[in-house]
Image (cartoon, coloured by chain):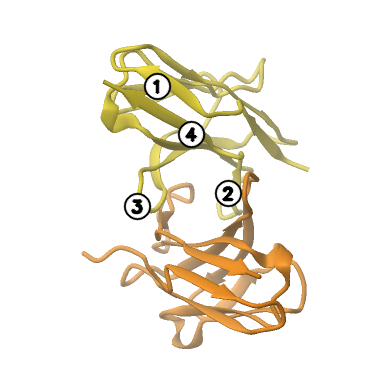
Chain colours: A yellow, B orange
Amino acid sequence: GDSVTQMEGPVTLSEEACLTINCTYTATGYPSLFWYVQYPGEGLQLLLKATKADDKGSNKGFEATYRKETTSFHLEKGSVQVSDSAVYFCALSERAGTALIFGKGTTLSVSS
Amino acid sequence: EAGVTQFPSHSVIEKGQTVTLRCDPISGHDNLYWYRRVMGKEIKFLLHFVKESKQDESGMPNNRFLAERTGGTYSTLKVQPAELEDSGVYFCASRKAGGDTGELFFGEGSRLTVL
């Protein structure tokens, strides 16, 4: 069945460091891909998404490109801030209306 | 606009007891989802309501779990009797009809600890 694999955390960075969180997926069709983020004490919220190959999703300085050839959707940010400390979840949806399939989540901790 | 709210935020019960979790979706959101995250594992889909109807309940682990959404507003998820492996964080999410199917609005989750 469909699945999402994320790099294991926690990831600990200093402020202004570069971030990459790897995400690869397995799917039978052409899924939509998402990154959700959960800040401390809050619910998950959509960070960015891409619905077809080569699309780039971006938000709040984060980017991820839908790579069909490598079945990947890695999350990147050039310069992280303390406020980026959170748990990041990669997810896919096989088709409209179907349930999201999540990875295990990656905890990011940024120190000043 | 109020977000998705869940109650209780944390529940500690003994094996064999019953627990009921409640979710109030964003007003006007016809779609309501339940997910569960067991410690260190993926967030797993449990079921999906469209209004008061169960659209997809393929993720429900067994018949100890009962979800309802009477009147198509709030939803409850009852676990009876609870087992140790039911411990985890239960998330509720909602989405309006016709909304972007990938963008769900999540609550903070209800943490269930079964001793």
Type of residue at label 1? Glu
C-alpha separation, residue under disc 2 versus residue under disc 4: 20 Å
Can residue B89 be seen here?
yes
Q: Residue beneath label 2, please?
A: A100
Q: Is residue B28 left or right of residue A87?
A: left
Q: Is residue A68 left or right of residue B6?
A: right
The chain under label 1 reads A
Q: Secondary structure at mark 2?
A: loop
The first of marks 1 and 4 along the sequence is: 1
The first of marks 1 and 3 along the sequence is: 3
Residue A11 in the image: above or below residue A39 = above
Type of residue at label 4? Thr
Give the position of the N terminus of chain A as an image quadrant.
top right
C-alpha separation, residue under disc 3 versus residue under disc 4: 14 Å
C-alpha separation, residue under disc 1 versus residue under disc 4: 17 Å
B76 or B47: nearer the viewer = B76
Marks 3 and 4 on same chain:
yes
Residue located 51% across and 72% down the image: B11
Q: Residue beneath label 4, please?
A: A107
Give the position of the C terminus of chain A as an image quadrant.
top left
